[in-house]
Structures are given as C-alpha cells and as structure tokens.
Image (tube, helix red, strand yellow):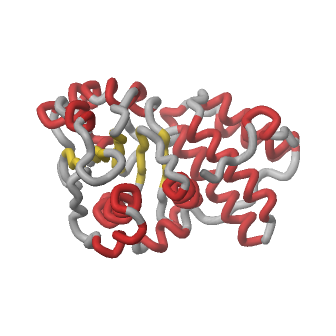
Amino acid sequence: MPDLDALLKASPDWARLDRRIAGKNLPQTLGCFLPATHWESFLGRVAARVLAGEEAVAAFSEGEAAHPDLLRYGTPDQPPGIEQCRPLGGDLSLAPVTASFRLGVVFCADRLSLPAANSLLKVAEEPPEHGKLLLLAERDALIPTLRSRLTPFFFSAPEAIPAAPYPDSEEAWLAFLERRSAPESNRRSASADLQEELQAWTRYCLEKGAYSQADTLNHLSEILSGIPLASSMATDLVALTLGEGLQLDSFFGPVREA
C-alpha cells in the first residue's frame, strides 16, 4: 500500500480539496473515501490546516490528531453507535475554542448502523454556523439520504487506477454509454466508478502533457462531486462534454480555485 503522500499526489481530488482549504471554502459536510490505514495521518494533515493554520501543521503528530475544536466519533476500527451520534449536532453548535469552527469527524461512516446514520441526517444537511462535518469511509456505501448531503472526495491507491485514455471515437463513446448503463448491482457504486474513470483519464492526459483536457476533466469531477446527478445524467454529461464538445462554463461557470 502506498504511503499517504503518494496516495494524495496520485489523486486529483486532493488538489480539489487543497484548493478549498487554501481558499477557506471547505464544504459544510464532506466525505473522504480512502484506506482506513491512512485515516489518522490524513485527519492530522487536514485538521492542522483548517483548525490551526499552516504554521501549526508540524505540531500535529502522525498519530491521533488532537485539537480542542476537533470532535471524534468512533475510531478507525469501530463506527460510532447511535448514542455517540445523537449529540453530534449539539456538540458542533457550541462556540469554537480557538479555531473559526468546530470539526466533527465520524469514522467508519460506511459501516454506520441505520439508526446511527439516520441520526446524522439533519446535521449533515444543515450543520451549525460554526460547525463542519467530515465523514471518513473506505467504501462509497453510505445510505443514499446521507450520501446526498455531502461533498465527496476520493483518494484511491495509484495502482488501483492506472492511467487510461478516454474514448476517441463515436463507436468508443457508444460502448462507454452501453457499459455504464449496466445495472448498478453488477458493478461498484456508480458515482465512485465514474469518478475513478475520470481520474484515470486525467492521469493519462497529464502524462501526455494534454493539460487543457486534464483541466476539463478536473472541472467535470468538481461538478459531479458538487451536484447530485443521477448516474445516467452524469454519464451523459461526461459524453457530451468530452465527445461532443459541450462547453461546461456556459452552464456551470469556470472552475473555482477558492
């Protein structure tokens, strides 16, 4: 398994998340999907920057991240139960101690019991003014009502997503559309599958020096992460943009760096 630096460097979504952090535009509710072995290091890196500022990053250990405004629910080995999840909204609504907001972190979000997951729906949709919610999971398998309330970021092992060219002919696009119209039960979560396909295409473009195409792919990834589209609509948007030359800025505006 690659170390965290290699994992983040190989994942286009890290650049998206990094821009949001740098621009102080962190989503109110976000879901980060990556191997559990990296959760503590990843959390330490993110929490140091969003809660304590760049100058304090080095002060966070690579072990369990700690900060008075960092609230932890569950552990990397065990999801929180409903008794732990119920007070989360109230905890986040309290005034921050030293940071500009409080960050509630739910571990093993893809393994939450149904009652525990349902208890998070209200706070996930409308976090308190000075609160943000981070769900950590290995699989994109959250209950749909909770999944629809977050902005997702995917960090997959480099070897799991090799560079691959996107379709370059009408026949290839038709094959892409047919493949993605298969029942979701026969393949992985549709959103994660499409995001990883976009990452593979982006990596291919970067390796070939096709930076304009890579920017377009990153813009697509940003749109699909931020707007809850049905799988068929997301697939059509990808095909229209890359296969038919649809200008994304005409409908969604330019990529926001902050």
The answer to whether residue 174 is seen in the rendering is no
Which residue occupies the foreground of this view, 254 or 130? 130
Q: Relative to 164, say whether 96 is above or below.
A: above
Q: In which quarter of the image is residue 84?
A: top left
- The answer to whether residue 244 is left or right of residue 51 is right
Image x and y of residue 247, in percent: 84, 40
Which residue occupies the foreground of this view, 30 or 194? 30
Which residue occupies the foreground of this view, 249 or 147? 249
Q: In which quarter of the image is residue 123?
A: top left
- The answer to whether residue 95 is left or right of residue 35 is left
Q: Which residue is drawn at 57% across and 41% down?
A: 225
Image x and y of residue 235, in percent: 68, 36
Q: Which residue is drawn at 47% across and 68% down?
A: 7
Image x and y of residue 180, in percent: 65, 37
- The answer to whether residue 76 is left or right of residue 159 is left
Image x and y of residue 164, in percent: 69, 61
- The answer to whether residue 115 is left or right of residue 24 is left
Q: Residue at x 52, y 40 (%)?
A: 187
Question: How many numbered marks have been drawn onto this rendered protein structure?
Answer: 0
Q: Residue at x 43, y 43 (%)?
A: 30
The answer to whether residue 166 is seen in the rendering is yes
Considering the image in quadrants, where does the N terminus appear?
bottom left
